[in-house]
Structure formats: C-alpha cells, structure tokens
Image (cartoon, rainbow, N blue to C red):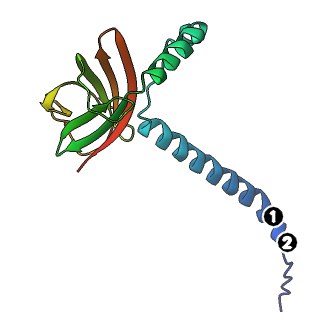
Amino acid sequence: MPSTSHTRRSVWHLFPVAMIAGLGLVVVVNAGMVWASLSTFPGVAATDVFDHSNNYDAVLAQASHETALGWVVEASADGAVATLRIADRDGHAMAADRVSASAIRPVGPDQTTQLSFEPANADSFAATTALPSRGQWDLRLTVTRGGDVLHATRRVQVK
C-alpha cells in the first residue's frame, strides 16, 4: 500500500498574489479617475493670470467703481433667449448705451456664444441671438452707459 502524505500548504503562499492584485486594482481605479477628470473638464485655463495679478490695484479700483454705481442686473431666459433687466440703485429701470455678453457653459462640453442685446421694451433687454442649447449658461455681461462700464456674471437656465 502506497503511503500518501498530505502536507498542508500555508495560506501565506497566496500573499504575493493578493498584494499584486490589490495594487493592480488601485492602479486601474486611479487610471479611470484620471481619464474621467481629463476627458470631462470644461474649464478654461487663463494665460494672463500673472499680468492680472500685477495690476491687482487697478482691478480693485474698477470693482469699487462698479459697486459705487449701484446698478442691478437681473438675467433670465425666455425660452432660449436671454433677457436682462438693468436698474439703478433705487430699482428704477435704466437705459444702457451698449449691452453685450459671452454666454459660457459652466458644466459639460466647453461652449461659448457671443451675445448682444437690444431693448425689448421699456425696462428690459433681449439677446439678438438665441442660446444654442438647453441647460445652464453663465452670462459674462458688459453694460456701458456714458463713460461707466459694469462687468457682471449672471447664470440663466434654458429649459
């Protein structure tokens, strides 16, 4: 009768395999997260940040001047057309010499549309071009009246 000797192997012989599998899983998950973040980033990297910081006192002075104007800008979307109401500090509608904007998608694919506005009635302005798609849009507005300029950003939702 042949003798059979069963030696039980320790479970520790699987430890290197488990370590390699665990590290491989970490690498795969991290690679997936890097791919997802790089393929979906809609932001814009500014190239003039250093120059902007060198003139920061002028930026603060401009912001202070715009705040002192007291103008209030309200934005909405009537369908796909952006509409604005511009008022003075007392809440009375006011006329503007020129109103323009860049409409930028804050989420999703990078998309920018230039808009200009014309008076729609006594107290509002309407964009001359419709926004190209549904969703959220940030309107970076420039309102000019006389020698004064106001820069503002307002978010609208096109449904």
Which residue corresponds to the image point at 62% horizontal and 46% vertical from the top-left?
27
Q: Is residue 65 left or right of residue 25?
A: left
Which of 132/85 is in front? Answer: 85
Residue type marked 1: His
Report the label total: 2
Contact? badges 2 and 1 (CB < 8 Å): yes
Query: Do we see residue 45 in this rendering?
Result: no
- Position in image of residue 120 (x %, y %): 13, 32
Label drawn at residue 10: 2
Which residue corresponds to the image point at 69% horizontal and 56% vertical from the top-left?
22
Which of 6/97 is in front? Answer: 97
Which of 71/28 is in front? Answer: 71
Q: Is residue 149 above or below residue 25?
A: above
Q: Secondary structure at mark 2?
A: loop
Q: Secondary structure at mark 1?
A: helix
Label drawn at residue 13: 1
Q: Is residue 23 left or right of residue 8?
A: left
Residue type marked 2: Ser
- Position in image of residue 6 (x %, y %): 84, 82
